[in-house]
Image (cartoon, helix red, strand yellow):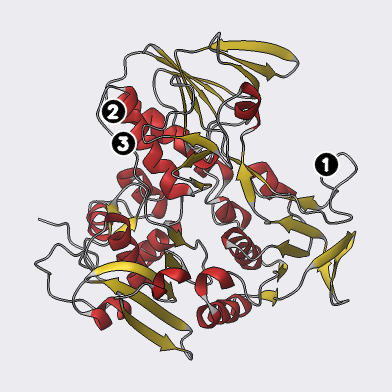
Amino acid sequence: MNHVLVVGHGPATHRLLRGLRRHGHRGTVTVLSAEDRPLHSRAPLTDVLAGRVGPNLLQAAPEPGVQVLTGTVAHALDLRRRVVHARQGATHTRHPYDILVLACGARPVIPRLPGAAGRHGRLSAGVTTLRGTADCARVRGTAVTVLGGGPLGVETAAALALRGTATTLVCRGPHPLHQRLGDTAAALLTARLQQAGVTVLGGRRAVRRDPGRLLLDDGTEAAADGLVLCTGAEPEVRIARAAGLRVHHGIVVDDALRTSDSRVHAIGDCAEHAGRAVAGHESALAQADTLARILTGGAAAHRPTADLLRLRTHAADVACVGTRAGFRRPGLRTVGLLDPAGRRYARIALDGDRIAAAVLLGLPQAVATVSHAARRGLPVPSDRLGLLLGTPSPPPANGAPTPEDSLVCLCNHVTRQQLADAFALGARTAPALARATRATTGCGGCAMSVDTLCRAWAGTGQREPEPAS
């Protein structure tokens, strides 16, 4: 293998490039990026939307020896000649490869909503999706409505409220994330969003968008100088399908992340492995790590990661492991906590001492510990109440994570203790902690946690952590 060509320049590509360098790849690498700007991670875009960080903070440092062609849109794939055809402005370009990696990501689903888009599918003025930093700049007005009750819809609405925008969240379910959280936890999430300044309109369907307003199916209106569509995404498979690669919902890959052409691989949201497509950020990074080892001659096989959701919002710490159906498996033991006044909730299904399914809200330390344990298949601490409340417990003998070694940054495996060590050695701001430990530079989901820890350690009267010996 000499020349690797990658189509797409998101976080999975960045992780792949780092892995190729780490594992000793000696050939050349070219990346075709449709973006005009350098790489950014889409996951923390809501931090840009909220005004917490600038767009440049999302740009990753370029990998040495990699040629990145920005503004280059791949539009056709010739498998027989091993060439990708692309457009760079008005210029047609050809890009040969020995190995091709499709990391095309996903594209937003645009609902059939009168007034939201024109005849040719172009979004109307004041309407946007949220896929890049340029989209953040398009969200304007004193009143903005977010359509969609999934994770991105919740995060977007909370971010807009944080920056002082009058924000309405419209969702078809009775509450946002109702299918993942269930009745009780979803109702508590609604209460937390409303406390954060978001007007939540559940059980409603948008029927028409007019300038300045969104008409709902019950005859009510939501003020909407701007409308943000968070209505789902689908794998970007168009050039793969046109070239004759096997496509189901995503581009079908095997355990080596190979497509139906052995010289073409696919990773990230465009890929479908073991019948699972659009599997999210965790799976994309795991696929990138596996493929880097495979392309450098290592023995590796991709295995699906835990179905883990962590919400990125100041309004509530939320985590889900698995689905609600996971709680119904026979032989499981369930532990839980309900604190309506504090708007805290936890329900964990245990298979022995391993997590089979979980829903947590308003319990940040438990969210970090449970997420870490689920991701690595580790046992949970024997003190179940201490786990839920985040109280310290004696170091376990069975390898379960303690509060100190609980993972804060899932993408880069950064623990609370590593952050404390970096802080004690002089990294006294969240960006400095990011530079020292790489925390927050993956999906960005831990940005709020890192910022909270940094503020607590730097606060008046707070004892600074000591470096671990």
Of the numbered discs 3 and 2, the one sitting upstream in the chain is 2
Return the x and y of residue 301 as percentages of the image width and height: 31, 36
Q: Is residue 177 shown left or right of residue 67?
A: right
Q: Which residue shows up at 57% across the image and 34% down it?
A: 247
Q: Is residue 388 shown left or right of residue 101?
A: left
Q: Which residue is mark 2?
A: 22
Which residue ends up furthest to the front in the rendered image? 330
Q: Which residue shows up at 26% across the image and 62% down it?
A: 406
Of the numbered discs 3 and 1, the one sitting upstream in the chain is 1
Q: Is residue 36 above or below residue 93?
A: below
The kind of secondary structure element at disc 3 is loop
**425 and 40: which one is in front?**
40
Q: Which residue shows up at 33% across the image and 35% down it?
A: 290
- The amino acid pointed to by label 2 is Arg
Specify whether residue 457 is in view. Answer: no
Locate the C terminus and report the quarter of the image it occupies: bottom left
Q: Which residue is mark 1?
A: 122
Mark count: 3
Numbered disc in front, either 3 or 1? 3
Q: Is residue 93 above or below residue 337?
A: above
**Circle on res. 301:** 3
